[in-house]
């Protein structure tokens, strides 16, 4: 987070040699740079109030320019009120010199940046494990571009900010900025001169993990206004970048081969429009698409007032698109105020993959991401003629209308779809169906055959009787499709509690394998997977107890031994492997070659539960009680447009709600009056009473200003009435189930060394379901103490 503070390094009498940036990573003098791509479709979360979109990266006049625009589908509650621009290198670089020629924006409330970064979202091909959060920053606040901030993070620990006075206004002209990154020190440079240096110590090492080079332009949420300034009235201002250079070697990653693009050379006016039957995927809870087709089925009007959940309007094109490879349609935005953000997915015949190659809108090349589809921004009253080339046999065509996010947003829209046509140009590319020899493998003396998403959709299975192994290959596994192969193991696993196997990655990339032992009955509200824990080569790996699955990242060429412990009391029935398809947020298409062997179920069918974690006894006289009447209550209250009514009476905080969505992740956030006490301690205690008639699911996050793995929650462990409950140290939060009419005592241990920014209570809002909840709870007897 940006925040100026005193120097922790050296500024005077620096004698560093000039930067030696001999390799040009990107040069935008002629337009796009092949080594860099645009971030598209996600947000970083607080304090960013910006969703990245490729449309906000502009190549013109010999520079790459980043912009911020209104996001008609966004909100500050979801940190997506605006669109922003971000560029990233495909490749990862380590120690060396880095330099950029740039001109930052002087728009108040914004940040213009140049930095290297990696984190747990990157799986390291050398280790097969997630990377730590390492980062080195050069950042400009638009509020005052006569200064530049330097900072760095090591495994998620920051707090090294230094604000350097430039002596000129950086927004007025291009200057060069850079840094030298070594194992022992970092030196930052301005216009070729060293200006600030930090040296490694035993307690304060330097970043050590190779990362991408990034540049972005973003505005902050209202919580960031005190240090960024207030952002308002988006305009055409934005940082401009001329080039990026480095001396660092590429540690890993490849620049993809450019997609060869051709224009459609036929005449669409000579082809009759197809008559199709429109339907929609929404379930009536979130998106409310209303489809009014024309009598001849050649057009349709779609109206809606809210959209999300990745819902779509679709039609089956298998007949009209038979032996064709180009699609045409016309989109008309009938609204005079709303901009529509649309993604068109041409799905294959099996509905397992998106097969768009590239597309044009009114003769301009559109953004098409492999495995994802073609995205369109349709301005008010705009008509767009869309042409899309696809590879393979087409099945359904999906139009995601303002729905490319998990949350449902209010959006009054009116769109007409017409002139749906298909044609062929050039040779038809039909993917080959892989040859399979799947005769099953022997596990615990019984023949077990795997099926599921097989036959090349995306997996092909070949078994070998002599080695009793199963080889799985794939060329188009989509990263977040959750496709899998599975087998019935009820007869051999029901009296055991351990599954073990040897897995060999025969490919050239890290493979992510999720192993599920699926039970015959639900383990919790979100999953039937009964995994308890897992190891890979004897080392513990992550098991998701909320949503299910044990996660294994296997380096290229490696053979590993895995072991999964499961709870046999739920009735294990299915063994399931998700290979490169179960990483949240992964939009890439993967290929791989994996062999499973030595599969076995063992154990006595009994699981010894760990000893319950005893609550920590507060030191005598060392507990600080919190006056809830003096605490600032923020978050998603009714006053802020949320579902929660929060009111303090008799020293207790009552929270009532009638429309809390189970996948909204909304919360009541206690800040001033609570965080000051929390900052001096590391244990929270509180009593919560469920006054309602239904069980309440509660998650408590002790929030900090820096990332901890994938979250800003710094919880370490927790108990409810003296019994240990789950704390997710990867994605955040401690989880409590409170039955109707019950009062429970909660204790949360957190990292008190961090800067605490809030105590969040997520009440019936984090379970990942569309169900709407109502409830009434009381929060009282809040106190903090310090435990050594």
Image (cartoon, grey):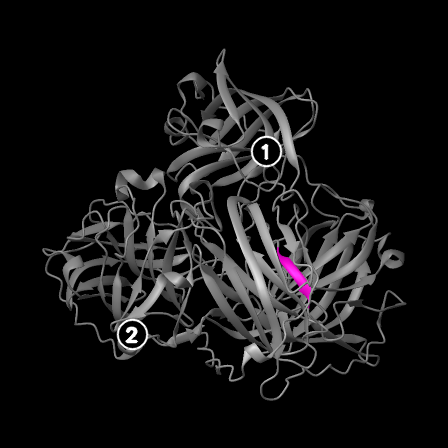
Q: Which residue is rendered at x = 54% and y = 55% of the image?
A: 415
Could one spot residue 788 in this view of the protein?
no
Report helix, strand or loop for mark 1.
strand
Front residue (pair 379, 651): 379
Vertical relation: 393 (above or below) 207:
below
Q: Main secondary structure of the magenta part?
A: strand
Q: Position of residue 416 (x, y in %)?
A: 56, 58
Q: Residues within 10 Å of mark 1 (few under 14, many from 20)?
A: many
Q: Is residue 50 magenta?
A: no
Pointer 1: what residue?
660
- Give the residues in magenta: 312-316
User: Relative to 653, is 663 on the left or the right?
Assistant: right
Front residue (pair 113, 356): 356
Front residue (pair 354, 120): 354
Q: How many marks?
A: 2
Q: Position of residue 324 (x, y in %)?
A: 65, 80
Which mark, residue 467? none
Q: Residues within 10 Å of mark 2 (few under 14, many from 20)?
A: many
Quadrant (top left/top right/bottom left/bottom right) for the C terminus: top left
Pointer 2: what residue?
28
Vertical relation: 328 (above or below) 625:
below
Q: Which residue is rendered at x = 63% and y = 36% of the image?
A: 725
Residue at the limit of the structure toward the top, as seen here: 650
Vertical relation: 781 (above or below) 59:
above
Cα–Cα gap, marks 1 and 2: 47 Å
Q: Position of residue 181 (x, y in %)?
A: 29, 66
């Amino acid at each position: 987070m940006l925040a100026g503070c005193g120097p922790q390094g050296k500024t005077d009498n620096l004698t560093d040699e000039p930067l030696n940036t001999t390799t040009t990573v990107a040069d935008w003098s002629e337009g796009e740079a092949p080594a860099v791509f645009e971030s598209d479709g996600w947000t970083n979360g607080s304090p960013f109030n910006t969703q990245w979109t490729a449309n906000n990266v502009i190549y013109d006049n010999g520079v790459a320019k980043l912009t911020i625009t209104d996001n008609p589908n966004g909100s500050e509650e979801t940190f997506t009120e605006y669109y922003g621009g971000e560029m990233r290198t495909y490749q990862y670089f380590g120690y060396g010199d880095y330099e950029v020629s740039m001109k930052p924006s002087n728009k108040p409330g914004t940040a213009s940046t140049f930095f290297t970064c990696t984190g747990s979202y990157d799986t390291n091909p050398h280790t097969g494990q997630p990377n730590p959060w390492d980062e080195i920053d050069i950042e400009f606040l638009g509020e005052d571009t006569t200064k530049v901030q330097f900072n760095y993070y090591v495994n998620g620990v920051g707090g090294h900010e230094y604000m350097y006075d430039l002596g000129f206004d950086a927004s007025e002209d291009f200057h060069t900025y850079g840094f030298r990154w070594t194992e022992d020190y970092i030196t930052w440079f301005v216009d070729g001169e060293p200006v600030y240096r930090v040296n490694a110590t035993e307690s304060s090492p330097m970043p050590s993990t190779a990362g991408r080079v990034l540049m972005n332009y973003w505005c902050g949420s209202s919580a960031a206004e005190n240090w960024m300034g207030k952002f308002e009235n988006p305009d055409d201002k934005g940082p401009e970048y001329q080039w990026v250079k480095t001396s660092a070697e590429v540690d890993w990653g490849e620049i993809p081969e450019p997609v060869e693009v051709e224009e459609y050379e036929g005449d669409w006016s000579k082809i009759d429009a197809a008559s199709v039957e429109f339907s929609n995927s929404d379930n009536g809870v979130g998106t409310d698409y209303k489809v009014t087709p024309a009598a001849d089925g050649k057009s349709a009007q779609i109206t809606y007032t809210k959209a999300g959940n990745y819902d779509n309007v679709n039609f089956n094109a298998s007949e009209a698109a038979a032996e064709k490879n180009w699609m045409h349609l016309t989109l008309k935005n009938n609204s005079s105020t709303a901009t529509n953000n649309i993604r068109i997915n041409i799905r294959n015949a099996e509905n397992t993959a998106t097969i768009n190659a590239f597309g044009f809108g009114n003769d301009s090349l559109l953004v098409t991401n492999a495995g994802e589809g073609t995205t369109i921004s349709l301005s008010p009253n705009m008509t767009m003629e869309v042409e899309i080339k696809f590879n393979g046999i087409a099945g359904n065509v999906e139009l995601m209308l303002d729905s490319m996010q998990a949350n449902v947003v209010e959006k009054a829209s009116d769109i007409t779809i017409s002139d749906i046509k298909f044609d062929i140009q050039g040779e038809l590319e039909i993917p080959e169906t892989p040859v399979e020899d799947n005769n099953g493998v022997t596990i615990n003396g019984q023949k077990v055959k795997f099926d599921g998403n097989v036959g090349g959709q995306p997996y092909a299975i070949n078994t070998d009787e002599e080695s009793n192994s199963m080889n799985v290959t794939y060329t188009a596994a989509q990263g977040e499709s959750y496709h899998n192969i599975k087998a019935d193991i009820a007869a051999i696993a029901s009296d055991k509690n351990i599954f073990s196997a040897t897995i060999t990655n025969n490919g050239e990339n890290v493979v992510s394998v999720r192993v599920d032992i699926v039970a015959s009955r639900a383990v919790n509200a979100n999953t039937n997977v009964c995994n308890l824990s897992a190891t890979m080569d004897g080392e513990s790996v992550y098991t998701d107890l909320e949503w299910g699955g044990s996660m294994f990242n296997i380096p290229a060429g490696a053979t590993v031994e895995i072991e999964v412990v499961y709870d046999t009391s739920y009735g294990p029935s299915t063994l399931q492997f998700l290979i490169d398809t179960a990483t949240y947020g992964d939009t890439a298409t993967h290929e791989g070659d994996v062999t499973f062997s030595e599969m076995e179920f063992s154990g006595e069918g009994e699981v010894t539960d760990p000893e319950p974690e005893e609550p920590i006894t507060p030191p005598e006289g060392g507990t600080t009680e919190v006056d809830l009447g003096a605490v600032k209550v923020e978050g998603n209250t009714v006053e802020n447009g949320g579902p929660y009514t929060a009111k303090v009476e008799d020293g207790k905080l009552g929270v009532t709600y009638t429309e809390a969505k189970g996948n909204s992740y909304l919360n009541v956030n206690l800040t001033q009056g609570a965080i000051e006490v929390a900052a001096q301690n590391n244990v929270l205690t509180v009593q919560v009473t469920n006054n309602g008639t239904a069980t309440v699911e509660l998650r408590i996050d002790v929030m900090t200003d820096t990332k901890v793995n994938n979250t800003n929650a710094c919880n370490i462990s927790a108990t409810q009435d003296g019994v240990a409950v789950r704390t997710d140290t990867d994605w955040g939060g401690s989880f409590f189930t409170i039955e109707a009419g019950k009062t429970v005592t909660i204790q949360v241990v957190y990292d008190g060394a961090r800067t605490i920014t809030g105590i969040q209570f997520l009440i019936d809002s984090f379970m990942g379901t569309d169900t709407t909840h109502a409830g009434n709870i009381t929060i009282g007897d809040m106190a903090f103490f310090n435990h050594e």
